Image (cartoon, helix red, strand yellow):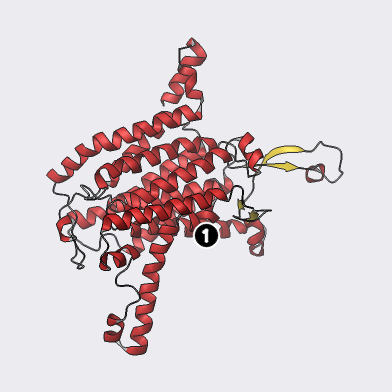
Amino acid sequence: MLYYLFNFLDQNFDFPGAGMFKYISFRVVLATLLSLIISMIFGGRLINMLRKLQIGETIRDLGLEGQMQKKGTPTMGGLIIIGAIVIPVLLFAELNNIYVILLLITTLWMGSVGFLDDYIKVFKKNKEGLSGKAKIIGQIGLGLLVGITLFYHPDVVVRDYLSPQDYCDEPGQIAAGYTDIKSLITSIPFLKNNELDYSSVFNFLGENGYVLGYVLVVIFIITAVSNGANITDGIDGLAAGCSAIIGITLAIFAYVSGNKIFADYLNIMYIPHSGELVIFCGAFVGACVGFLWYNNFPAQVFMGDTGSLALGGIIAVLALIIRKELLLPVLCGVFLIENLSVMLQVGYFKYQKRKHGLEYAKANRLFKMSPLHHHFQKSGFHEAKIVSRFWIVGIMLAILTLATLKIR
């Protein structure tokens, strides 16, 4: 909103300093700072309100050190993150940008699904919260919306070089050049000719039938990443810190993908209008870092599913928009490992139970506890040390992800 106001003042009244709002870098700084201020200042007030309403976390005794001391800690802190993202984006981003609109919808959509889960746990005193089936339906609904929008919306294009043969059957009639085209291409990491076209992968579905395959891929990615973030949110500061690292990395990708000069220099896909995503990324990172002010060990508030599902959904949709979703297994490696640890634990337990019986399976688990961060807790590591080391792993994976810009 302020973007449009200052743009109007600059064009009509030559208002001093108003022209600064034309620059993405300036608006990113403002969005990040405002996000930090909202999460740090107003976050404290929200925590006090949650305490007065006795909206505290219900803790199951899993035998973890210091676990029961967290009983009654305010939850639903994800509202802080959502507010600290949405408000700066509304103020400083171009609101007619389809990518910004999609990300705002994603934030509110997944935040609402998580809020329902937390509400049922806290106010209905149901420890199970929202059923797994209901969560999946919410994720599928968002996946359908995002997939169909990215496929059909006229502003979702990439800029590509077309030869005269691409224009007509008789070469030479039209000069070759760059043009914006509708395409389902995405980037494959670590390969020289690193483009994959979903329409070629799903061409067995028939003409235009590949939209179904693409939408299914989008649904899978959103579901996997949002669930991964949800599972990772098990100890103080882990999910918020890892998300901030991922957000910084995606901001860099969004900036170079939306800047023609950098895209040409790095020989990567140029995506018109995607530079505006950097403002959203700035607010996202500011919200995560500001939330850590209260969520770092010992946590004064938990984000709950309200925050974790929203964070995972945002990361997934961001990666899909800038055509870097195939990098998510590397960039979101911490989320992936946490997810896999749960799947392996359950699968191994069922196998041992079927082969040797229930008692043997209980005594011979693959991990002492899953997700993986609880395994390290059971092994005697302090949770602050676990979190800091997971952050270091996240930073290493982020650097490796950024290296794919040149390693091809």
Q: Residue at x 55, y 56 (%)?
A: 326
The mark tally for this picture is 1
Q: Residues within 10 Å of mark 1 (few under 14, many from 20)?
A: some
Q: Is residue 148 above or below residue 261?
A: below
Tell me where residue 86 sits by quadrant.
Answer: top left
Image coordinates of residue 212 in percent, x first then y, are: 56, 59
Instruction: List the single residue furthest toward the bottom.
Output: 356
Compare residues 234 and 393 and report the one nearer the observer.
393
Residue 64 visible at all: yes
- Secondary structure of residue under mark 1: helix
Instruction: List the single residue furthest toward the top.
Output: 13
Tell me where residue 210 sits by quadrant.
Answer: bottom right
Query: Left or right: where does residue 326 sit relative to residue 56?
Result: right
Image coordinates of residue 197 in percent, x first then y, are: 65, 55
Q: Residue at x 43, y 61 (%)?
A: 336
Image coordinates of residue 96 in percent, x first then y, are: 49, 33
Query: Left or right: where does residue 294 sit relative to residue 203?
Result: left
Compare residues 407 and 89 and report the one nearer the observer.
407
Residue 82 visible at all: no
Image coordinates of residue 320 in percent, x first then y, are: 52, 50
Residue linked to disc 1: 216
Query: Left or right: where does residue 283 sit relative to residue 57?
Result: right
Q: Residue at x 31, y 58 (%)?
A: 386
Q: Residue at x 52, y 60 (%)?
A: 216
- Of the residues shown, which amino acid type is indicated by label 1? Leu
Instruction: Name the quadrant of the N terminus.
Output: top left
Compare residues 100 and 141 and report the one nearer the observer.
100
Q: Is residue 210 above or below residue 399?
A: below
